Amino acid sequence: MANSQDVLTIGDLARRTGLTVSAIRFYEEKGLVASFRTGGGQRRFFRSAIRRLSFALIAQQLGLTLPQIAAELAKLPEGRTPTAADWKRISSGIRALIDRRIAALERTRETLDGCIGCGCLSLDRCALYNPGDRAGLSGAGPRYTIGAQGD
């Protein structure tokens, strides 16, 4: 069993991360951190949970979903503080995601003025954004997100 220097109560973890106890339980439920129980049934976390939760908060600000964050954190060994090499490996994947988003935003920026300026304001007739009412084949409601048109 880990010594008391290596583990935190959920209250200690909340104080160290700025998260509420309920938020930590939520993240635990989503698989971002794991706890173990003491002989008395009390929840304990390895100290590495501080960095895992901090990473989750930053990754959410970057636009990653909880499943994406959980997948990245699953690559780290539980209970060990992530190393610089761990973070470098994870950040390269996130960097690729961010690069794709930037490219999609740049494509959107380049077409935005032209689409608004054409005056048609009709997705079912737009030859650039929705040729042949391609989106209508998928049913009613919004079909495209930034960068998804033409995919």
Image: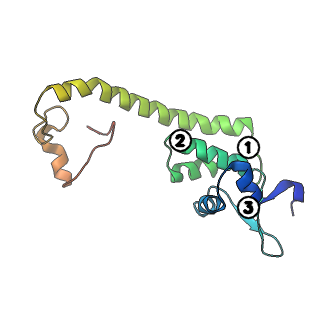
The image quarter in which residue 38 lies: bottom right
Q: How many marks?
A: 3
Residue 48: give x, y in percent of width and height.
75, 50
Q: Is residue 110 visible?
A: yes
Query: What is the secondary structure assignment of the residue under circle 1?
Result: loop
The reply to whether discs 1 and 3 touch (Cβ–Cβ < 8 Å) is no
Label 1 vs 3, first from the N-terminus: 3
- Of residues 54 and 76, the one drawn nearer to the viewer in this rendering: 54
Residue located at (19% from left, 29% from top): 115
Q: Amino acid at mark 3?
A: Ile
Which is in the foreground here, disc 1 or disc 2? 2
The image quarter in which residue 21 lies: bottom right
The reply to whether discs 2 and 3 touch (Cβ–Cβ < 8 Å) is no
Q: Amino acid at mark 2?
A: Gln
Marks 1/2: CA–CA distance: 20 Å
Marks 2/3: CA–CA distance: 23 Å
Reading the image, the residue beneath label 2 is: 61
Reading the image, the residue beneath label 1 is: 82
Residue located at (73% from left, 61% from top): 10
Residue 86: give x, y in percent of width and height.
69, 40
Query: What is the secondary structure assignment of the residue under circle 3?
Result: helix
Q: Which mark is residue 10?
A: 3
